[in-house]
Amino acid sequence: MTRVHNFSAGPAALPEPVLHRAAEEMLDWHGRGMSIMEMSHRTPDFEGVIAAVEADLRELMGIPANYKVLFLQGGATLQFSAVPINLLRGKQKADYIVTGSWSEKAVGEAKRFCNVNIAASTEADNFTYAPTQSELKLDPEAAYVHVCTNETIMGVEFPYVPETGNVPLVADMSSHILSREIDVSKYALIYAGAQKNIGPVGLTVVIVREDLIGQPLPGMPTLLDYKPHADNGSMLNTPPTFAIYMAGLIFQWLKDQGGVAGIEQQNIAKAKCLYDCIDNSGGFYRNPVRVSDRSRMNVPFTLVDDKLDSVFLKESLAAGLSSLKGHKSVGGMRASIYNPMPLAGVEALTNFMRDFAARHG
Ligand code: PMP
């Protein structure tokens, strides 16, 4: 068996020890003669699993007691709707900070439910930076402010937490949750699709301040109302049991890495290694993002001549480096280097990049 270094943006690489453990437990979880996937969610066994997963996430992120943790389905995309449905709470307007494709998509859904004020947009500069606090045109009467703190496609990560006064701050952290230390109490709501830093696809995590839920827009589907999910311990209907179990294994692995503080140091080293390689390539590789706002998780880069793209992809794959093709809206390459990607994987990539540039430059 040969495993590649997988730079996919999501679903993405998982830690190898986690995959081994899941494989070992696949046919017989803890002597029950069945896999976790085959077990009812209404068993004490699964109730124990989901409780431990929540406790571990609370510990890893330092989630205060007045926040609910919800394990949902529908991806981060469904949260683009669930957020306005739950947080408008009688108001008719919300602020959105637009820094790339995902915040744009969030705006598109929010417009179905309320008036959207674009508090800032970096579109005119091809989404190459995060607006500073003074550039935000915030409305003190808005129901909430929405931000995508790491834009997966453009590779732009907020280096600061927007200050929104009394207006609740909502963050789509899909592509960098658990990659760096954050102060959860600065946010009213955090959501993330699991398939990057949390586990396999099928699970969406929502962390929400409990005083904000329970007043959804009337007439909405029950499954889009956070309150019954919270009241039923994320078991309002059948939850994605396997994805939750896998998230639990990953949280254990994360603790072995020294928790979020430990993995953050690894992520800083990995990002430095890759950006240094790009910046020191004499223009052969380029990343357009403002240095202070460059994502530690998603690193898009172009080659000096796009005619080399297909050769780069073919040769990199042959060298055991997979899924480097950039998103079609940006072109070039993108290396997603989430928590599970070891520094050795990034070093293998940068060694390849230097060699490729020497041969084709
Ligand atoms: N937000 C961000 C930042 C993302 O990266 C993605 C997926 N790549 C989404 C939202 C949408 O997630 P999903 O496909 O889980 O709906």
Image (tube, rainbow, N blue to C red):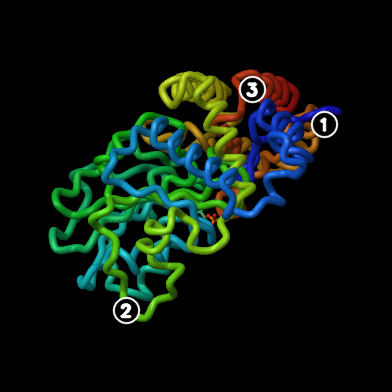
Residue on which disc 2 sits: 218
Residue 189 image position (x, y, % from top left) = 32, 51
What crowding class fits label 1: few (fewer than 14 Cα within 10 Å), some (14-19), or many (20 or more)?
Answer: few
Q: Quick one: 351 or 80, which is closer to the camera? A: 80
Q: Quick one: 83 or 274, which is closer to the camera? A: 83
Residue 297 image position (x, y, % from top left) = 51, 35
Q: Work out whether mark 2 precedes mark 3 in sequence or the reverse, and give the earlier one.
A: 2
Q: What's the residue at 56%, 40% (across, down)? A: 247
- Which amino acid is tagged 3? Thr
Q: Identify the element where label 1 is drawn.
A: helix
Residue 44 image position (x, y, % from top left) = 56, 46
Q: Work out whether mark 3 precedes mark 1 in sequence or the reverse, and give the earlier one.
A: 1
Residue on which disc 1 sits: 318
Q: Quadrant of the N terminus?
A: top right
- The circle on residue 350 is 3
In the rendered structure, the answer to whether residue 144 lies left or right of residue 148 reads left
What crowding class fits label 3: few (fewer than 14 Cα within 10 Å), some (14-19), or many (20 or more)?
Answer: some
